[in-house]
Amino acid sequence: MKKDIAVYLKFIRMHFLVGLQYKGWWMMALSVLVTCVMDILPAYLLFSRMGSVGVWTWERILLVYALAVTSFGLAESFCRGFDYFPWHMLRSGDFDRLLLRPRSLIWQVAGSFFHIHRLARASIGIGAIVWALGRLGAPANAYTVSVIALALVGGALVYSGVFVMSSGVAFYTIKALDWIYIVTNASYQVTRIPIEYMPPIFRHAFTFVMPMLVISYMPAAAVCGWQSNAGALFGLAAAHPLSGYLALPAGIAFLALSRLVWKIGLRKYQSTGS
């Protein structure tokens, strides 16, 4: 395991240095920053015009959204190889070269791509989390820091699991799957909806199928002490401080399920290429 992680870190370092050689990398990072700002800008304009929606203020929406988008940003930065796997490695037949190496395929694929400008999404998300917590009056203590940090780790594992699961299914389809965007880009957009007003089917899907609300709403509610009537699980967030730590086990469980899908697909793999 240590050697596998060492190889992964060498891959990431190599791609990072290569990215710095491109003189326009900062412009690409700036474009990602602008995209992130434009994503949440309509919600800000709505709240600045209409005021709060019940107990939901602009700062509340921003905190939940920032936790989800930062988790996605970390996953797409450090697990980018699985996002590119179906068409850059599988269809071309380059994946066969990885099978010959005496190292874990998971770590090799994860480190096969890294784009430095993708860190911009995670960076602006972390800044938004800090700002929103300050505006909401969340206590600046070890509990808040630990819950938020573990929520980001758990969230990154969830989104990484989506990439891994999609790559596992790609062994059968030999191409990228469009549905992955429903549970990546589209999922963190759902966090702009106050949880009490979210349709039950979406609330249940993004809690028990893909635990996106577990890694975004519950840590925020636990840290800020929010009450909710959206269900017993979300009501636990303010009543039981330890519920804020559920994001990490949820991320581990989802990633474990995704690895199972990957292994099943890998056993069916019989090589491919142009």
Image (cartoon, rainbow, N blue to C red):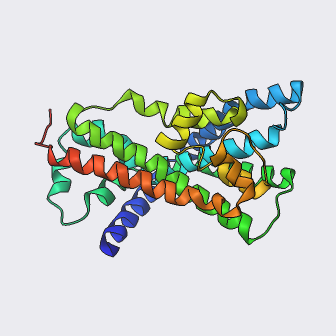
Task: Residue lying at the far front in this picture: please name it.
Answer: 232
Q: Quadrant of residue 34?
A: top right
Q: Is residue 81 left or right of residue 220?
A: left
Up/down of 201 relative to 83, above or below: above
Apparent side of residue 36 relative to residue 98 in the rendered image (left or right):
right
Q: Nearer the viewer, residue 231 or 160?
A: 231
Residue found at the far left of this picture: 270
Task: Please state the horizontal and vertical placement of residue 198, each as a whole percent of the image.
Answer: 66, 30
State the residue in front, 261 or 140: 261
Q: Quadrant of the C terminus?
A: top left
Residue 112 in view here:
no
The total of numbered circles placed on residues is 0
For the point 81% across and 43% down, the residue is 59
Residue 1 is situated, as x and y percent measured from the top left of the image, at 32, 72
Q: Nearer the viewer, residue 109 or 207?
A: 207
- Provide residue 212's location: percent of width, then percent of height: 56, 43
**What residue is drawn where x is 47% and y is 40%?**
209
Question: Image height check: is 202 above or below 27?
Answer: above
Camera-side residue of 223 and 35: 223
Q: Judge whether 45 appears above or below 62 on screen.
A: above
Q: Tell me if I can see residue 205 in this picture.
A: yes
Residue at 39% x, 42% y is 83
229 above or below 109? above
Question: Residue 265 is drawn in which quadrant?
Answer: top left
Q: Position of residue 50 (x, y in %)?
A: 88, 24
